């Protein structure tokens, strides 16, 4: 057999190996802050009569609360919501004085931080009203049926006397079934909210998160509180509006392999090749927050096409079908979430909500991968 003759013909002295270090083969998160602002502006147009807050809890749904809050404040956002006091303090440090920062979970043993960071706590119970002890303006959360946080309508008379002359910055409630815009419980909660709000004739009112804002203007009141909408999903079960993709997750190919019919792939050998295939092993797995429920269902995008996941997602690796894809080479990045792998699509394939996809996948890659 004739040996390859094109090798070693060059008699010039061997050049030293390039000192350029190979980049780490890690997953990468790119956050598009302009897209977050674009989505916030979508809600401003949707609710021209209301102020539009920005919910940046859970580290900005995994994308980074400080970066999102800075971009939104620059675009004109004046009201922010975090879940915890610590998150609120971080946002305050990033934004300086001026914007109002509400803490949804309300005060506990962290009142000193709330006061020092000029946060506005949401009072969710009689106990929190007493704990806050009319120090400064606070929001009041009325439970209209979610049964999670908030003061029930029957407790309101008690709450009124406990509040005394506390300045109420906001009276709010939260919808349980907003993701189904036709759900009868939405109108029940709307009615309960209007009834309760009669007791606070001067306080600004807020009922709607992302989905609630999409139900219609009856739900907007003085302030809407979109969270997931800012990050690219309408939060509805169906017929979501088209919002801009804000997070792109890419991961590098480690190996490309050729497989024969009959070969199986990954743990459990759950996929069997029925023909010759080319596969790519990619550095992304459930330890990076890429949900295992995407096994055999999800895809990566490479060379302008969807490349199906073969078999199970493992801890740090995924196998893709890249048959006929010339771009599939070690080191090439594959998109798993982003403009070509839409959030709502990936969430549906994973049998979960876009919230979980963002907080697990973007949240984990943000901490352990490359931030671009
Ligand atoms: C999380 C949350 C929001 C934002 O909800 P999205 O569905 O992400 O828009 C608004 N209000 C409250 C009370 C929340 O807990």
Image (spheres, grey):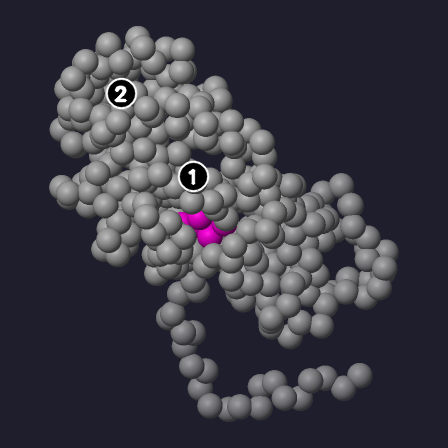
The residue tagged 1 is: 219
- Seen from the viewer's position, the closer of residues 1 and 253 is 253
Q: Give the magenta-colored segment's residue range.
A: 228-233
Give the vertical position of 343 relative to 187 (above or below).
Answer: below
Which type of secondary structure does the marked residue at label 1 adopt? helix
Q: Quadrant of residue 269?
A: top right
The residue under the point 77% across, 62% down is 259
Residue 233 is situated, as x and y percent measured from the top left of the image, at 50, 49
Residue 56 shows in this picture: no
Image quarter where the C terminus lies is: bottom left
Q: Earlier along the polypeptide chain: callout 2 or callout 1?
A: 2
At 55% from the left edge and 63% from the top edge, which residue is drawn? 340
Q: Mark 2 points at which residue?
A: 107
Does 121 appear in magenta? no
Confirm or reject: label 2 Cβ below 8 Å from ligand 1.
no
Would you say the magenta stretch is mainly helix, strand or loop?
helix
Q: Is residue 260 above or below residue 196?
A: below
Identified at 70% across, 61% down, the residue is 321
């Amino acid at each position: 057999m004739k040996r390859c003759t094109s090798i070693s013909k060059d008699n010039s002295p061997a050049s030293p190996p390039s000192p350029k270090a190979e980049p780490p083969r890690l997953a990468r998160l790119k956050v598009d802050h302009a897209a977050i602002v674009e989505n916030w502006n979508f809600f401003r147009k949707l609710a021209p009569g209301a102020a539009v807050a920005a919910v940046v809890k859970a580290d900005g749904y995994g994308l980074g609360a400080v970066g999102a809050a800075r971009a939104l404040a620059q675009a004109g956002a004046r009201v922010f919501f975090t879940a915890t006091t610590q998150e609120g303090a971080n946002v305050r440090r990033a934004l300086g004085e001026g914007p109002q920062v509400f803490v949804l979970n309300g005060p506990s043993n962290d009142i000193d931080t709330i006061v020092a960071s000029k946060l506005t706590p949401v009072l969710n119970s009689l106990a929190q009203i007493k704990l806050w002890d009319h120090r400064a303006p606070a929001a009041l959360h009325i439970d209209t049926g979610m049964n999670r946080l908030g003061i029930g309508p029957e407790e309101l008379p008690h709450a009124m006397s406990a509040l005394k002359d506390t300045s109420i910055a906001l009276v709010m409630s939260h919808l349980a079934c907003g993701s189904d815009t036709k759900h009868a419980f939405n109108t029940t909660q709307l009615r309960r909210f209007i009834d309760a709000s009669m007791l606070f004739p001067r306080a600004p009112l807020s009922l709607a998160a992302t989905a609630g804002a999409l139900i219609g203007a009856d739900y907007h009141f003085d302030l809407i509180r979109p969270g997931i909408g800012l990050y690219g999903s309408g939060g509805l079960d169906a017929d979501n509006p088209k919002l801009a993709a804000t997070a792109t997750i890419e991961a590098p190919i480690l190996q490309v392999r050729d497989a024969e019919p009959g070969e199986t792939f990954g743990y459990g050998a759950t996929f069997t090749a029925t023909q010759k295939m080319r596969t790519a092993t990619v550095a992304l797995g459930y330890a990076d927050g890429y949900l295992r429920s995407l096994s055999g269902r999800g895809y990566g995008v490479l060379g302008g096409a969807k490349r199906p996941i073969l078999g199970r997602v493992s801890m740090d690796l995924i196998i893709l079908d890249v048959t006929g894809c010339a771009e599939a080479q070690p080191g090439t990045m594959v998109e798993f979430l982003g403009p070509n792998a839409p959030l709502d699509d990936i969430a549906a394939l994973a049998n979960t909500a876009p919230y979980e996809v963002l907080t697990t996948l973007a949240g984990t890659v943000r901490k352990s991968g490359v931030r671009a």
